[in-house]
Amino acid sequence: MLFIDCRKMISFYKFFCLFLLILKYHHLCAADPTDGFTPVPLTEDNFVLQKPYNEPLDDRYSYKDGVRSFWIYNHDKPFKADSTTRPRSELRISGHDYSSGIWQFEGYTYVPSGTSGVTIVQIHGAAEGATSLQLRMYDGDIKYYKYNVVATDLYDKWFRVNIIHNVDKGKIIVFIDGVKKFVVKDQGPGDLYFKCGVYAAPENSSNFMESKWKEIKLYKK
Ligand SMILES: *[C@@H]1O[C@H](CO)[C@@H](O)[C@H](O)[C@H]1NC(C)=O
């Protein structure tokens, strides 16, 4: 009798442990932002670069061992001589018609501590104004423009960024390391495409700004 009770207890204990494990780790098997999406093939031709007009590309961008580095200085020139925009070293994903459907950007990024006041990824295009989304690094935290905090404590580490733009529904969802962090309405139709790199914010920019990117992918649903 005692023997059977013991076995029952052991079996209960095993299930209890399993239950605790599921509680602790269920997020690891939770849905991935790319579930249900189809990868869109990209070649180097899809990546269009912008940099201060008076600097050689090699002085503001490098691509080595799969890692793209983008860097600028606060007082760099804009991308065109006749532009009044802030300096940038950015990559735009071109060659697709983003005017309808559900699109997703994915990439891993690394921002060194000190880089601040800079957009590291954006959705270009809006009914009014130039962009529908800017994710900016300020002092280690990622913000929606200079407003909502999307994620914190991200200096000096690789993290994964997924941005879903449901153009048909006018909705944008931001994931950091696979976790949904921010949902916002887009800003209407426009000349839509994803960009990443560094684009100095209107104010509070550090003198040096850098982001590194790897495994940049585009998906569609
Ligand atoms: C920019 O700097 C000013 C002065 O330090 C500060 O009040 C403001 O909140 C900063 N803006 C952002 C978006 O961090």
Image (tube, helix red, strand yellow):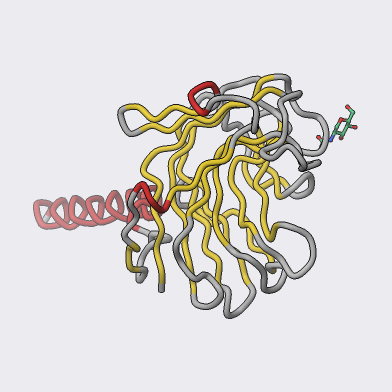
What is the quadrant of residue 205 in the picture? top right
Which image quarter holds the N terminus? bottom left
Ligand 1 falls in quadrant = top right
Q: Residue at x 61, y 31 (%)?
A: 153
- Image position, residue 114 (x, y; %): 66, 20
- Image position, residue 127 (x, y; %): 75, 70
Q: Residue at x 74, y 48 (%)?
A: 145
Taking depth in this image into account, of 73 and 117 the one nearest to the observer is 73
Q: Is residue 19 left or right of residue 100?
A: left
Q: Residue at x 81, y 29 (%)?
A: 204
* Number of callouts: 0
Q: Is residue 188 left or right of residue 197?
A: right
Q: Is residue 118 left or right of residue 194?
A: right
Q: Is 201 placed above or below 77 here? A: below
Q: Residue at x 73, y 37 (%)?
A: 81
What is the quadrant of residue 166 in the picture? bottom right
- Image position, residue 91 (x, y; %): 52, 44
Q: Is 183 placed above or below 158 here? A: below
Which image quarter holds the C terminus? bottom left
Q: Is residue 1 left or right of residue 170?
A: left
- Image position, residue 54 (x, y; %): 65, 27
Taking depth in this image into account, of 49 and 209 the one nearest to the observer is 49
Q: Is 39 placed above or below 113 here? A: below
Taking depth in this image into account, of 41 and 1 the one nearest to the observer is 41
